[in-house]
Each structure stands twice: as C-alpha cells, then as structure tokens.
Amino acid sequence: MTRGSQCKVTLAGAAWGLACAGLLWGCNRPLREDPPDAGVPPAEQRCEGFQQVGAEEAVDLSTGLRWDTYAELTLLTHEEAAARCEARGKRLPTRQELVALRRPAPDGCALPACPFRGDRCATIQCGSKIPGTSDHWGVAFSGGGLVGIPAGQPEVVLCVAGP
C-alpha cells in the first residue's frame, strides 16, 4: 500500500469485502511515521544534570557516562546482565557509579525519574564483586543503599558506557 491510497469497499453477494491490505480504519490518511526525535523530551523538560541522546540513552553531564535510560524489567543473573550490556557496547556500572545516581524523590525511589524509566525502585546490579565472596554489589534504589547480591540471583539491569 502506498501513502494516501484509498480503500475500496465492494459488495460481493451479501458480504462486504475490504481490499485495503488488511487495514480496516483510516485508509484515506497517509501512513504515520514517528519523527526522528520521537521519545526525546523537549528542551524545557530535559533532566537536570543529564543530556538526552535519543529516547534510550542519557549522558551524565558531571561524569560523561552514557546511561541506558530504561531499567530492564527482565531479571538477569550477573553473568547474563554482563553479557546483555556487552552486546549493547556497554558494561555493568561500578557500585560508585550507581550510588552517585541516587536522588531523593517523593515516591521513595532513589533512581531519578528523569531521565530514567522502568523499575526505578529496584535493586540494580553492579559489575563489582564483593571481595572474598562470589557475590556482587547492587544498589537497592528503594532506599539507595548498597546490598550484596548472591551469585546466581537475578536482578534488574542498567547498562553504562564511558570512562
């Protein structure tokens, strides 16, 4: 179907047929395409301390780190989380990097609502191991504290890239 094409309705016996590539409504309107900056907040809604880079990434202006803005709702083990971040050209954050994101919020979630989305109150995995154990650090954004995540326990993922 091309832009602006018309639907043709025909009567065949007692049944109505629709010859419009399976479309049922709005056939006279052109197909809608999202603009290239879809999902990026306008300048007046940009987040303090962050610069949006598309709809899925923001740069922390104080550190230069490029953060995914969506806290993955799929729980992954540490190994799975590290592989997911690596496949995106990123890594799991250090505990210091995650702790630095904490901001007080009226809803009690310490991961800032702007620019982050998804499970902002979750425990998010760090790339740092707890010395002398097989466990890894995590940050519980429901209160903002450091927690130990036992080896093999799945948690939320937030990937980062940069220095």
Image (tube, grey):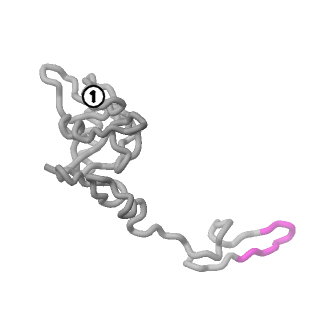
Q: Residue at x 86, y 70 (%)?
A: 13
Residue 131, given in percent of the width and then of the height, sits at: 13, 23
Placement of 91 over or under 79, stated as above or below = below
Question: Residue 143, located in which quarter of the rendered image?
Answer: top left
Q: Is residue 13 magenta?
A: yes
Is label 1 in a helix, a strand or a loop?
strand
Question: Residue 141, located in which quarter of the rendered image?
Answer: top left
Write down the residue under mark 1. 145
Residue 60, given in percent of the width and then of the height, sits at: 23, 51
- Classify 10 Å Cα crowding around label 1: few (below 14), some (14-19), many (20 and above): few
Residue 125, given in percent of the width and then of the height, sits at: 27, 34
Q: Residue at x 37, y 39 (%)?
A: 105
Q: Residue at x 36, y 49 (%)?
A: 114
**Region in magenta:** 8-16
| Nearer to us in this view, 142 or 86 | 142
Residue 43, given in percent of the width and then of the height, sits at: 35, 63
Taking the image as shown, residue 66 lies to the left or right of residue 28, namely left
| Nearer to us in this view, 39 or 60 | 60
The N terminus is located in which quarter? Answer: bottom right
Question: What type of secondary structure mainly makes up the magenta span?
Answer: strand
Taking the image as shown, residue 149 lies to the left or right of residue 15, namely left
Residue type, numbered disc 1: Gly
Counting labels gives 1
Q: Residue at x 20, y 40 (%)?
A: 97
Placement of 97 over or under 77, stated as above or below = below
Taking the image as shown, residue 146 lies to the left or right of residue 122, namely left
Question: Residue 20, located in which quarter of the rendered image?
Answer: bottom right
Q: Is residue 145 magenta?
A: no
Placement of 14 over or under 113, stated as above or below = below
Taking the image as shown, residue 15 lies to the left or right of residue 162, namely right
